[in-house]
Image (cartoon, rainbow, N blue to C red):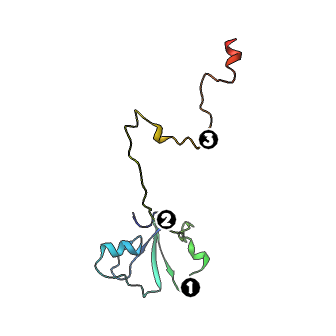
């Protein structure tokens, strides 16, 4: 699982050490040599169907953005993790106000007692 690209759809086999990586940064972190990029033929492994295929980088067309076995679209804009600021609160079982966003209008909660027809039921 790649920590640099969250929506990685394929693994790439590096031509220098013949190991599988999700991105170039994963290769840089785990290996002590630079990634060799002079080869035009790349080997991919689809994470959806778990099958391998090769693509020529010089003749890459729009139809080559899909896995030839399962038609999984693997050329996507990369989602990278972004740093967030989170607030730690009290015990959620005691105070659950932080979990509910009051700005978002929700569907009305289901209840046995309905305020709109309370006058008719009570008399």
Q: Position of residue 2 (x, y in %)?
A: 40, 65
Asked whether the residues under the numbered discs 2 and 3 touch, taking CB atoms below 8 Å apart as contact, a structural biologist would say no
User: Residues at badges 2 and 1 in contact (C-beta under 8 Å)?
Assistant: no
The image quadrant that residue 91 belongs to is top left
Between marks 2 and 1 in the image, the one whose residue lies nearer the viewer: 2
Q: Considering only vertical position in the picture, is 113 above or below 11? A: above
Give the residue displayed 38% in from the left and 78% down from the top: 14
Kindly report the distance in space between the C-alpha atoms of the residues bearing marks 2 and 3. 28 Å
Q: Which residue lies most toward the top here?
A: 123
Picture coordinates of residue 121 (x, y %)? Answer: 68, 15
Q: Quadrant of residue 18?
A: bottom left
Label 3 belongs to which residue? 105
- Distance from label 2 to label 1 (Cα)? 26 Å
Neighbour class for label 2 at 10 Å: few (<14), some, many (≥20)? few
Give the spatial CA distance, label 1 vs label 3. Answer: 50 Å
Read off the residue under disc 1: 59
Check disc 2 and report the residue beneath it.
79
7 above or below 88?
below
Which residue: 44% across, 66% down?
5
Near-viewer residue (7 or 47): 7
For numbered disc 3, what is the local secondary structure? loop
Residue 123 as seen in the image, left or right of residue 34: right
């Amino acid at each position: 699982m790649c920590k640099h690209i969250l929506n990685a759809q394929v693994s790439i086999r590096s031509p220098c050490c013949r190991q599988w990586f999700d991105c170039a940064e994963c290769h840089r972190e785990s290996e002590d040599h630079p990634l060799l990029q002079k080869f035009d033929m790349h080997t991919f492994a689809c994470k959806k169907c778990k099958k391998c295929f090769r693509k020529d980088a010089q003749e890459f067309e729009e139809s080559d953005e899909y896995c030839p076995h399962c038609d999984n679209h693997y050329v996507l804009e990369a989602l990278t993790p972004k740093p967030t600021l989170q607030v730690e609160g009290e015990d959620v079982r005691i105070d659950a106000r932080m979990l509910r966003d009051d700005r978002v209008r929700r569907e009305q909660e289901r209840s046995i007692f309905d305020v709109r027809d309370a006058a008719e039921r009570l008399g």
